[in-house]
């Protein structure tokens, strides 16, 4: 067969019709085949549009009209239809030309890959990954074993009493003693939160995440989730900022720039601020709920529901610009242990360098607040709200911490939990509220820079009211049903 | 480096730093994939050094044979 003619890709009928019409209209020379020029026009290539506008003069209007009409008749976006048709053609050519003697492993990987992307098999697979990776490993091993050891054996039994004694003996000023040690001291609180609670949990999470990353699961997750995300005005591409959101929502708010439409960017920023916990927060929440499967289910269910409901609502309110998403997935592979360990180490190191000064600063701020009485006043002010959602007054402290840094607040909650301050229902209400609760200061500042003060402030207010509103309703419902979790 | 999301292979020079305008840009050395925007971790310096060292030993071994 003659190569160039027989191997042309055939696109869906409306596109082919438009291509035929446009190619007859094109008079100028572009150094490309007319069909290619027409295809680029249909895919909204801005440079080609400028060129054609310049060279075809008034005919351009006719061409633009054809493009608009095609877009209306075509069910899927051109940007999606074109690569899909090409992909099919490539598969057909490859199937005809190549006799497959692929090793058994490749065929198996291919089959697993397809199972991961099919909604019926992919969803249970995703749940398995979450169950073993997050619940069992981060919540079970990370919290139950590592944090427990560092908290109770290393800090509570040795470091803290030793530091307290040392400070009491050698530091004559009560104020400095309080700054370094005791209840809110830099070493006894700030360092302990960072080293004994947050870092091991985050480390366990980073380890699981590195395995997921290295295996090539993420693009498959994007394809799997694309359909659900389309309902809330996003596309599979939003998996990128969402997964990075686990690293830190601040970063992910910046990353949401890569999304196509303004609508997508606003929805993604809102959902990131509201329903995506950062890795530390997630780690601590998993630790808090570790021994209580029913509580985890309620927590995950409420967050998922909020995520979908708010996304859906935002998609209804914001003007419709449909995002397109299609990607070729890179091959699945067995994660390599060296890769995983290096990634885990790099992330932990970056994270630690980032949080340590902030945790120290938080301790200093709290100390200042204690000295001036401002802290007590703030706790007093927040306490009624905390009481309204059924939590003990001390939880107000954790929420105040949380606004400074989400992970700091979560660590504070963990502290209260180990002190035996919560029952099951209170635990779920507290974790749900803290997950939804205000984006931390850093994220708020970035949101202002990226989306403008008005959008950012509106979002902030919305998130605040929404978080406590959800906590209130959840508490009322759980108490009414008389469940104990 | 290789993007963990889309599989694109690129050099550190081709990629933009991940977080210009991020308050934590000082500690964070991530790079952005030029194709999809996913953030990729750079190799730590000591890993690079180790690899270079391993590579030179390997090259010397091959030259000796
Ligand atoms: Zn960063
Ligand atoms: Zn990429």
Image (cartoon, helix red, strand yellow):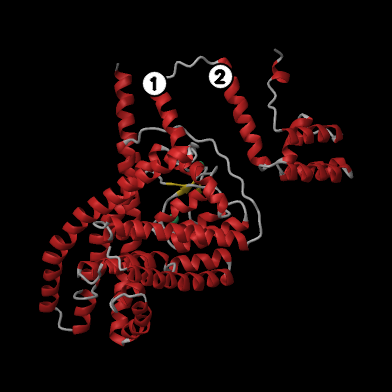
Q: Residues within 10 Å of mark 1 (few under 14, many from 20)?
A: few
Chain designation of label 2? A
The x, y position of residue A370, in whole percent, is: 28, 83
The reply, left or right, for residue A142 in relation to residue B36 is left
The x, y position of residue A401, in whole percent, is: 34, 72
Query: Which disc number belongs to residue A421?
Result: none
Q: Residue at x 35, y 61 (%)?
A: A281
Q: Is residue A453 above or below residue B44?
A: below
Name the image quarter holding the N terminus of chain A.
top right
Chain designation of label 1? A
Q: Which element type, helix, strand or loop, lies under badge 1?
A: helix
Q: Which element type, helix, strand or loop, lies under badge 2?
A: helix
Q: Considering depth in this image, is A416 or A408 the residue closer to the camera? A: A416
Name the image quarter holding the C terminus of chain A.
bottom left
Q: Residue at x 40, y 57 (%)?
A: A301
Residue position marked by numbered label 2 in the rendering: A95
The reply, left or right, for residue A431 in relation to residue A159 is right
Ligand 1 lies in quarter: bottom left
Specify whether residue A22 is in view: yes
Q: Marks 2 and 1: same chain?
A: yes
Structural distance between the alpha carbons of marks 2 and 1:
17 Å
Residue position marked by numbered label 1 in the rendering: A104
Specify whether residue B17 is in view: no
The x, y position of residue A293, in whole percent, is: 28, 55
The reply, left or right, for residue A51 in relation to residue B53 is right
Mark 2 or 1 closer to N-term? 2
Query: Extreme top residue here?
Result: A1
The x, y position of residue A123, in whole percent, is: 43, 43
């Amino acid at each position: 067969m003659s190569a160039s003619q027989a191997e042309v890709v055939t696109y869906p009928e409306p596109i082919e019709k438009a291509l035929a019409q446009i190619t007859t209209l094109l008079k100028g020379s572009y150094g490309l085949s007319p069909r290619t020029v027409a295809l680029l026009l249909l895919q909204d290539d801005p440079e080609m549009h400028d060129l054609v506008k310049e060279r075809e003069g008034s005919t351009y209007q006719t061409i633009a009209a054809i493009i608009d009409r095609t877009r209306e008749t075509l069910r899927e976006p051109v940007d999606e239809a074109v690569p899909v048709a090409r992909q099919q053609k490539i598969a057909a050519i490859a199937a005809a030309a190549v006799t497959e003697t692929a090793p058994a492993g490749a065929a198996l990987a291919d089959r697993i890959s397809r199972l991961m992307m099919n909604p019926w098999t992919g969803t249970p697979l995703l749940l398995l990954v979450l169950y073993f990776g997050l619940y069992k490993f981060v919540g079970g091993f990370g919290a139950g074993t590592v944090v427990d050891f560092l908290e109770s054996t290393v800090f509570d039994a040795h470091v803290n009493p030793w530091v307290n004694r040392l400070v009491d003996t050698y530091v004559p000023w009560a104020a400095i003693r309080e700054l370094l040690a005791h209840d809110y001291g830099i070493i006894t609180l700030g360092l302990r939160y960072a080293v004994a609670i947050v870092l091991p949990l985050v480390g366990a999470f980073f380890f699981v995440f590195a395995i997921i990353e290295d295996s090539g699961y993420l693009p498959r997750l994007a394809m799997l989730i694309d359909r659900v995300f389309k309902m809330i005005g996003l596309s599979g591409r939003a998996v990128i900022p969402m997964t990075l959101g686990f690293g830190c929502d601040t970063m992910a708010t910046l990353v949401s720039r890569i999304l196509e439409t303004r609508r997508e960017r606003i929805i993604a920023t809102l959902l990131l601020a509201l329903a995506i916990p950062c890795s530390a927060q997630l780690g601590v929440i998993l630790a808090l709920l570790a021994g209580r499967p029913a509580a985890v289910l309620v927590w995950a269910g409420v967050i998922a529901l909020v995520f979908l409901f708010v996304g859906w609502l935002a998609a209804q309110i914001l003007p419709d610009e449909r995002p397109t998403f299609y990607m070729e997935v890179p091959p699945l592979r067995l994660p390599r242990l060296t890769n995983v360990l290096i990634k885990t180490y790099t992330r932990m190191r970056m994270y630690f360098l980032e949080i340590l000064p902030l945790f120290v600063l938080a301790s200093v701020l709290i100390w200042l607040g204690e000295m001036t009485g401002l802290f007590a006043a703030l706790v007093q002010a927040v306490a009624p709200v905390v009481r309204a959602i059924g939590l003990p007054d001390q939880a107000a402290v954790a929420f105040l911490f949380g606004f400074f840094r989400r992970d700091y607040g979560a660590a504070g909650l963990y502290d209260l939990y180990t002190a035996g301050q919560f029952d099951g229902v209170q635990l779920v209400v507290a974790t749900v509220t803290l997950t939804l609760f205000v984006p931390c200061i850093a994220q708020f500042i970035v949101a202002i820079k990226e989306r403008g003060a008005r959008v950012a402030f509106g979002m902030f207010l919305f998130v605040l009211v929404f978080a406590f509103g959800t906590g209130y309703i959840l508490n009322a419902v759980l108490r009414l049903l008389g469940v104990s979790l | 480096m290789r993007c963990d999301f889309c599989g694109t292979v690129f050099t550190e020079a081709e990629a933009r730093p991940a977080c210009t305008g991020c308050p934590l840009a000082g500690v964070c050395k991530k790079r952005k994939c030029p194709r999809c925007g996913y953030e990729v971790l750079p190799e730590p310096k000591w890993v690079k050094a180790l690899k270079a060292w391993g590579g030179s030993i390997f090259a010397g071994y091959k030259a000796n044979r």
